[in-house]
Amino acid sequence: MIRISFIKKGDFFTGFECKGHSNLGEEGTDILCAFVSSACYMTANTVTEVMRLNADARDADGYMRLDIKDSPEKAQDILKGMLLHMTELQKDYPDEIKVITTEE
């Protein structure tokens, strides 16, 4: 199962952590994993490379985390867009993806 935690501090999302695999197909052919990975990379790249926010992005097989260090208010639209996208995927694949929001 893919688990995506959106991290919130006070009024602002400050990042996300995504881990796991959907196991809907073999490695390299799993469309849900591809959807989720693409959205995670697009969000992290937008925050770090386009918006140039001070953020830490880490990835490994089946894992990605984005932590925005300064000015998270500037990234709210992209993070809320990703949250909406993942929540909609969860509706279609409730046994393969779980979306939560955590407070720090």
Image (tube, rainbow, N blue to C red):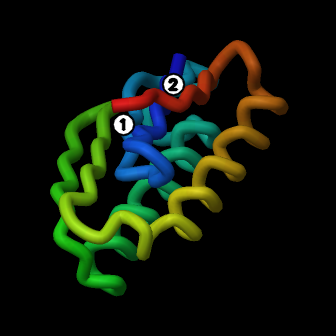
Measuring from the top left, give residue 89's x and y in whole percent.
73, 39
**Crowd band around label 1 with a 10 angstrom C-alpha radius: few (<14), some (14–19), many (20+):** some
Residue placed most toward the observer, 12 or 25: 12
Measuring from the top left, give residue 35's x and y in whole percent.
59, 49
**Crowd band around label 2 with a 10 angstrom C-alpha radius: few (<14), some (14–19), many (20+):** many
Q: Which amino acid type is marked by label 1?
A: Glu
Which corner quadrant of the image does residue 73 belong to? Answer: bottom left
Q: Is residue 103 above or below residue 33?
A: above
Q: Which residue is mark 1?
A: 17
At a point 21% along the width and 55% down the height, the residue shown is 57
Callout 1: SS: strand
Q: Is residue 48 left or right of residue 37?
A: left
At a point 17% along the width and 70% down the height, the residue shown is 54
Q: Is residue 12 left or right of residue 14?
A: right
Q: Which amino acid type is marked by label 2?
A: Ile
Q: Is residue 101 left or right of residue 14?
A: right
At a point 26% along the width and 58% down the height, the residue shown is 68
Q: Is residue 48 above or below residue 10?
A: below
Image quadrant in which the C terminus is located: top left
Residue placed most toward the observer, 68 or 41: 68
Q: Which residue is mark 2?
A: 2
Callout 2: SS: strand
